[in-house]
């Protein structure tokens, strides 16, 4: 019991006692002494004053309680309105998520499912009522769930949107989907993890299309490689035919004409001069035939790629007037397929033609490095950079097409001090088989 209540009880008891004495005096006609009457009057007056103070305190306390009650009612009304607004917002969010065609799952900081839209239910074959409050371990493989939970905790710790491609099984485990997941962490005002928004995009059909496209590309590359090899076989066959037939016939004709020229005496000067002109024409024809044979299939290819490239560099320097040097390293690695050697020879030949189109080139260094898994070819010139125009782009495109046949790569780098560096990487038979 409080102090105010005790004082109020004491005052009430005093008033009751005075009232009782007044009644006794009135009933029994007992005179009250003057001193006692004064005391009683003073006590009554004090009690009345104290009663008035007590009444004011009670009134003030009552008003304070009423204000507190009103404030509490206002807070309850505000909280109720906030709860109603939150519920309405959650309903709108759920309606929005339900209309999205891609699966959306909202999880709490412990990776427990808090919200799942209709698309996610259809993809996974699980109703939200069955999955709510769980992590999915009840209907997902244990190994997969362990990886998913570790990934989600890493996303919450990282604080960034993470995009990954993965495979997700459905509830039955009979179907696996290729999905692209977008996971965004959400934090409270104190920076603590609050929830994780997971959006999944089914890319199964896209993966199948990419796989089919990749297979088509590989088949096309294999077909192009076969065409290049067949073309080199045709070049070799034609060159061999020209050498065996036309070359031999021209050589025999030259021998006969030389014998005629030797037998022509001074008595037939016009015939001797005429036969000399025929010999000159035969020599020019033989040189042209040899050039055609070398263009079709250089005979130096039979001695290996380094020797053939040395001949090619010498011919390039002679025809273009550009100083050219060849550096060979690791040439001990053999080329098992001679047709492949012919195609690589054509690639270097095409690269030299590309360098010839660059402006201001006076020197070019060709480096050949044969490794166990790839062949590196580098051409560095001192020109003014890559030539512009459609012709240069066409030459570069032709070079890339030749290199793509073997799954290689072409890189071009322009040095700040001037000059261009053309790098070609071609997998060897071992490297291509390993890939």
Image (tube, helix red, strand yellow):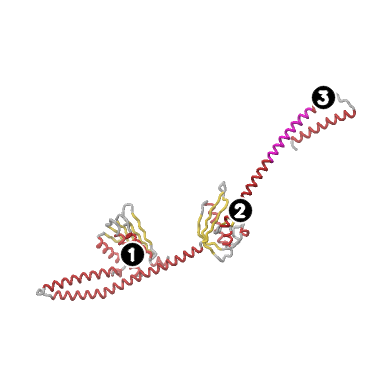
Write the residue at 24% across / 69% down.
288
Cβ atoms at labels 3 and 1 below 8 Å apart: no
The residue labelled by disc 1 is 347
Residue 32 point in image, percent of width and height? 86, 25
Helix, strand, or loop for circle 2? helix
Q: Which residues are magenta?
A: 45-69
The residue labelled by disc 2 is 91
Give the camera-side residue of 128 and 135. 128
Q: Position of 245 compared to 410: left or right?
A: left
Give the camera-side residue of 426 and 220. 220
The residue labelled by disc 3 is 38
Cβ atoms at labels 2 and 1 below 8 Å apart: no
Q: Residues within 10 Å of mark 3 (few under 14, many from 20)?
A: few
Q: Residues within 10 Å of mark 2 (few under 14, many from 20)?
A: few
Residue 98 point in image, percent of width and height? 58, 57
Mark number displayed over residue 328: none
Residue 226 point in image, percent of width and height? 38, 70
Helix, strand, or loop for circle 1? helix
Q: Position of 204 compared to 268: left or right?
A: right
If the image is split into quadrants, where does the N terminus sit? top right
Alpha carbon of mark 3 to alpha carbon of mark 2: how far?
A: 78 Å
Alpha carbon of mark 2 to alpha carbon of mark 1: how far?
A: 66 Å
Residue 56 lies in the magenta-colored region: yes
**Which mark sits nearer the N-terminus, 2 or 1?**
2
Residue 240 lies in the magenta-colored region: no
Alpha carbon of mark 3 to alpha carbon of mark 1: how far?
A: 135 Å
Write the residue at 18% across / 72% down.
279
Instruction: Identify the image quadrant of residue 292.
Output: bottom left
Q: Main secondary structure of the magenta part?
A: helix
Give the camera-side residue of 34 and 103. 103
């Amino acid at each position: 019991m409080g102090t105010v209540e005790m004082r109020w009880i004491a005052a009430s008891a005093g008033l009751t006692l005075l009232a009782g004495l007044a009644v006794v005096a009135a009933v029994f006609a007992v005179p009250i002494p003057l001193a006692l009457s004064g005391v009683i009057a003073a006590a009554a007056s004090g009690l009345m004053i104290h009663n008035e103070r007590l009444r004011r305190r009670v009134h003030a306390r009552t008003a304070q309680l009423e204000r507190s009650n009103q404030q509490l009612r206002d807070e309850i009304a505000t909280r109720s309105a906030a709860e109603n607004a939150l519920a309405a917002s959650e309903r709108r969010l759920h309606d929005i998520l339900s209309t999205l065609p891609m699966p959306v799952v909202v999880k709490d900081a412990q990776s427990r499912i808090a919200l799942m839209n209709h698309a996610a239910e259809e993809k996974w074959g699980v109703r939200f009522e069955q999955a709510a409050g769980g992590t999915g371990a009840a209907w997902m493989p244990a190994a997969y769930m362990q990886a998913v939970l570790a990934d989600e905790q890493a996303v919450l710790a990282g604080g960034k949107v993470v995009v990954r491609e993965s495979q997700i099984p459905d509830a039955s485990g009979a179907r696996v989907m290729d999905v692209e997941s977008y996971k965004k962490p959400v934090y409270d005002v104190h920076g603590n993890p609050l929830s994780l928004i997971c959006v999944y995009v089914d890319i199964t059909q896209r993966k199948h299309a990419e796989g089919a496209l990749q297979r088509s590309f590989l088949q096309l590359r294999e077909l192009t490689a076969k065409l290049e090899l067949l073309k080199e076989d045709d070049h070799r066959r034609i060159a061999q035919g020209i050498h065996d037939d036309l070359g031999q016939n021209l050589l025999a004709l030259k021998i006969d004409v030389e014998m005629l020229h030797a037998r022509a005496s001074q008595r037939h000067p016009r015939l001797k001069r005429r036969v000399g002109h025929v010999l000159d024409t035969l020599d020019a024809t033989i040189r042209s035939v040899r050039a055609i044979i070398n263009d079709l299939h250089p005979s130096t290819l039979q001695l290996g790629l380094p020797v053939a490239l040395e001949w090619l560099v010498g011919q390039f320097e002679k025809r273009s007037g550009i100083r050219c040097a060849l550096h060979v390293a690791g040439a001990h690695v053999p080329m098992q397929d001679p047709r492949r050697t012919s195609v690589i020879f054509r690639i270097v030949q095409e690269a030299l033609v590309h360098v010839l189109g660059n402006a201001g080139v006076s020197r070019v260094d060709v480096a050949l490095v044969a490794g166990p898994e790839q062949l590196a070819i580098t051409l560095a010139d001192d020109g003014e950079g890559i030539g512009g125009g459609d012709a240069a782009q066409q030459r570069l495109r032709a070079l890339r097409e030749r290199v793509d046949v073997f799954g290689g790569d072409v890189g071009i780098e322009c040095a700040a001090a001037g000059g261009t560096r053309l790098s070609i990487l071609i997998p060897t038979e071992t490297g291509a088989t390993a890939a």
